[in-house]
Amino acid sequence: MLHENLLITLLLLFAVSMIVMLGKKLKISYPVFLVLTGLGISFIPGIPAFEISPDWIFMVILPPLLYQTAWNISWSGFWKWKKSIGMLAFGLVLFTSCIVAYFSHAFIPGFTMPLGLLLGAIISPPDAIAANSVLQELKVPRQTVTILEGESLMNDAASLIVFRFALEAVLTGKFVKEEAAIAFVVVGVMGVLIGLAFAVLFYAIHRYLPTTPSMDATLELLAPYFMYLVAEHYGYSGVMAVVSGGLFMSFRSMKLHNYAISRLHSAAIGSVIVFILNGLVFILIGLQLPVVVEGIHGYSLYSAIKYAVVISLLTIVIRMFWLFFTSFIPAWLRAKMRQGEKKPRWQSAFLISWSGMRGVVSLASALSVPLLLNNGHIFPQRNLILFITFTVILVTLILQGLTLPFVTRFLRIEDFETVVPADEQEADMNKRLLLIALKELNEKYTGDVEQNEMLQRFKSELERDLLLHSEPVESAGQVRQQILRFSDVSNNILRNLRKELTRMRRENLFDDEMLRKREMQMDLDEARIYHKLH
């Protein structure tokens, strides 16, 4: 049994890699393509049923994904757009949950208000990974990406807290608004405190103990699990713990590692883990179709599809209404808007509203609904809730995911917030750093530079780079040609050096450890050349 499960998992990982490469070739977002492929595979006769365990998603997959998102988010952007992120992550989640609760209660026979609130909490949080995978291939404002990333960090916590209280109301038949509101705050705040406590602990370990790059990567892998599991064990929000801890570590990231190589090592391992987990989850979502359809009882397939499609469209409309209402109504009401303040752009609001694709958190929440109530009776409408959730994920991923590139190009959105283009910012930043380095060499280490040939070469390289960043705009084309030629020559030389390393290894001229160290140095040199070119 273990052998078969391991083989199936490996085959899925291989399929994910091939599908992602094919999706890049076809210019289709990989989450959307993986879900479509999973759907196609589910129709093949003889394919075994794949059922996702909600515990596996919440305890194994979600913590590292949230942690990596928090780690990579722009802290300054997150703080700058905190109001917009908060309105989406908390305001929109609560608004969506309430509207879906009232609508489903009125629209679906036998659907109570607590069940509607439960459904609303399940389908309210968008999956920004799906949106970002589309947007990263397009030219969109960094502001939009930051808001979506920030929303994805916070809305999972909000939706899961609402889900927890709605589920309790269905199970026990009791729901006190005042107690739920207080508990909502306590669960979130305590989760934040636990996350920050663990973040401080892991930061101290990274910063002050003699770690190695491998140890640093291991600690970064363990941190989100400690944050999440401890918070959940005491009944608080594990999501808020991971998010707050991840944001703290991101804010302190420049002082985190004792070795520069640790950052490269940890980033590489983190990107691989995120790719594997995301890929598996999205293809498994598509493979859930047979399990979900077989579970429908008490409704015809036509009725279930009708309810699911209507609610899917409702979630899209709710998000669009919320974005435009919160973006423009307050602006129109504020008197200072008439005094020269920038007006919000409808294109940005539309793009963010159209990026509300649902994903793995919604499916995991639906799957975690128990089979029985506390009194032993069957949980009402569980299968319909699961089917509606699955349909919402499919409709939003396929409809919005496939059309998002066309919408972006149609809107012709430019980065309204960035006054200075990114390439000019990078050139200015590099120039400032180079000037500081040269100033320190000239003022503090003049004698060392005169006597040390390696320092002389280092100074010459700094002066060359400074000259590169000081070129006037009119010679930009000439500089570009020089960089391209520099890249070609350098890569050719490195290629020949690698051949020589291969010969040395074949003839056992040096220890393998020394050869690997030199090979790593060549990799870093090649990465530096690539950065110059791009």
Image (cartoon, helix red, strand yellow):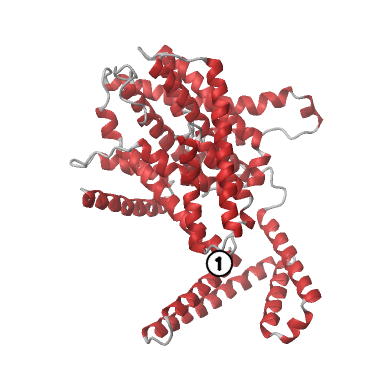
**Image quadrant where one finds the C terminus:** bottom right
Q: Is residue 322 above or below residue 13?
A: above
The residue lying toward the viewer, choosing from 125 and 311, is: 125
Q: Nearer the viewer, residue 481 or 151?
A: 151
In this view, the residue in front, 79 or 132, is: 79
- Compared to residue 3, the image places residue 185 above or below, namely above
**Residue 156 screen position, x and y as percent:** 50, 34
Residue that badge 1 annotates: 530
> Where does the image place residue 246, in percent across and percent down from the top left?
56, 46
Instruction: Please tell me which residue is depicted at 27% across the width and 43% down the height of the picture.
Output: 41
Q: Is residue 348 left or right of residue 36?
A: right
Q: Which amino acid type corresponds to the residue marked 1 in the rendered image?
A: Tyr
Residue 446 at x, y percent in the picture: 78, 80
Residue 344 locus on image (x, y percent): 68, 33
Q: Residue at x 64, y 46 (%)?
A: 75
- The picture quadrant where one finds residue 409 is top right
**Is any part of residue 148 visible from this angle?**
no
